[in-house]
């Protein structure tokens, strides 16, 4: 699993570049890959950032909830159908429903011996 190097290590690598050390020397000294050291320097040069990007989760909200609500209001048939669907769900008690997962129902999951 990938991990994020510490900010202290990033700062030391960048300081080594500022002292005119080569990428190979930096990689050997700090026991990091040359590619990672170059990326840290490139990120500082191009973006002015020395910190890693946040890990995990969405960085950008892909759905504008206000716009979605506006679109639903503009199309009353969609809103009406959604309310009908919600009302229908109460007809079926959850304890009586069965979920069948057919994801792996292909023949490749059967045993070869019989």
Image: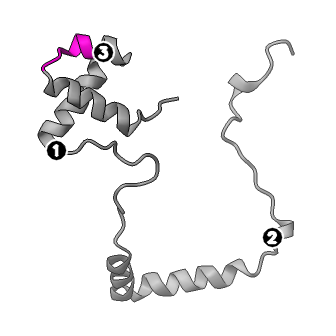
Q: Quadrant of residue 43?
A: top left
The answer to which of 48 and 79 lies nearer the viewer is 48
Q: Which residue is mark 1?
A: 47
At x 47%, y 30%, the residue is 2
Query: What kind of element bears circle 1?
Result: helix
1 or 3: mark nearer the eye: 3
The reply, left or right, for residue 45 in relation to residue 30 is left
Q: Earlier in the sequence, mark 2 or mark 3?
A: 3
Q: Where does residue 88 sit, x and y in percent of width and height?
A: 68, 81
At x 17%, y 32%, the residue is 42
Q: Quadrant of residue 37?
A: top left
At x 34%, y 72%, the residue is 64
**Tag count in the figure?**
3
Q: Earlier in the sequence, mark 1 or mark 3?
A: 3
Q: Which residue is mark 2?
A: 94
Q: Is residue 97 magenta?
A: no
Q: Where does residue 40 sit, x and y in percent of width and height?
A: 25, 32
**Would you call the spot at circle 3 few (<14 residues within 10 Å), some (14-19), or many (20 or more)?**
some
Q: Is residue 24 magenta?
A: yes
Query: What kind of element bears circle 2?
Result: helix
Question: Which span of residues is magenta-colored?
Answer: 20-26
Mark 1 to mark 3 CA distance (whole Å) = 22 Å
The answer to which of 47 and 86 lies nearer the viewer is 47
**Above or below for 49 versus 6:** below
């Amino acid at each position: 699993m990938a991990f994020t190097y510490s900010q202290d290590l990033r700062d030391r690598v960048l300081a080594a570049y500022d002292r005119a050390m080569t990428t190979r020397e930096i990689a050997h000294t700090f026991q990091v890959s040359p590619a990672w050291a170059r990326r840290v320097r490139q990120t500082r040069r191009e973006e002015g950032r020395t910190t890693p990007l946040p890990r995990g989760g969405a960085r950008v909200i892909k759905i504008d909830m206000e716009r979605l609500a506006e679109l639903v209001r503009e199309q009353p048939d969609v809103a009406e159908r959604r309310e009908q669907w919600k009302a229908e769900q109460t007809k079926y008690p959850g304890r009586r429903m069965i979920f069948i997962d057919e994801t792996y129902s292909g023949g490749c999951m059967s045993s070869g011996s019989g």
